[in-house]
Image (tube, rainbow, N blue to C red):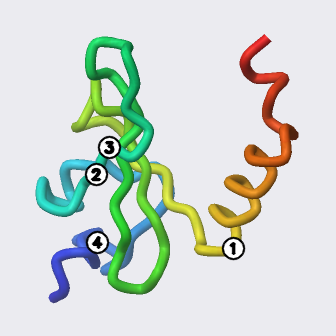
Amino acid sequence: MDRISVDREHGRVYNGMPARELGSEGWHKPWSGGNGGNCVEAMKLSDGRVAVRQSADPDGPALIYSRGELHAFIQGAKSGQADFLLS
């Protein structure tokens, strides 16, 4: 079984699954800042989706996004559509 297909009961990766079940290798901190190391970590999955977790809680839930969802979010953030999150 692929290490990414880790849901033992269903044999799949799912939104909200414990991030630790995706393993410890392959996580990156692309958005790290001056906040003491607490940031978002991302992992590209073998099927092209992306898992995201909070670095301060690496055993917490992983949010799973399709390539299209992540692309739309990044493009929207670049164009200012997410600025309301900072005010």
* 38 versus 69 height, above or below: above
Q: Would you say 11 lies left or right of 86 here?
A: left
- The residue sitting at 28% across, 13% down in the picture is 36
Instruction: Measure the alpha-carbon separation of dots 4 and 3.
Output: 30 Å
Tell me which numbered mark, 4 or 3, is placed earlier along the sequence: 4
The reply to whether the C-beta atoms of the residues labelled 2 and 4 are less than 8 Å apart is no
Q: Quadrant of residue 46?
A: bottom left
Q: Secondary structure at mark 2?
A: loop
Q: Amino acid at mark 4?
A: Glu
User: Which residue shows up at 26% across the image and 75% down it?
Assistant: 4
Q: Report the Cα–Cα distance between label 4 and label 1.
A: 27 Å
SS for tag 4? loop
Provide the residue designation for mark 1. 68
Residue denoted by label 3: 29
Q: Do labels 2 and 3 touch, CB within 8 Å?
A: yes
Amino acid at circle 1: Gly
The residue under label 2 is which amino acid type?
His
Of circles 4 and 3, the one toward us is 3
Observer-side mark, 4 or 1, equals 1
Give neighbour class at mark 1: few <14, some 14-19, many 20+ (Cα, 10 Å): few
Q: Which mark is residue 28?
A: 2
Q: Nearer the viewer, residue 40 or 80?
A: 80
- Of circles 2 and 1, which is in front? 2
Q: CA distance from mark 2 to mark 3?
A: 4 Å
Neighbor class of circle 2 (other Cα within 10 Å; few <14, some 14-19, many 20+) is: some
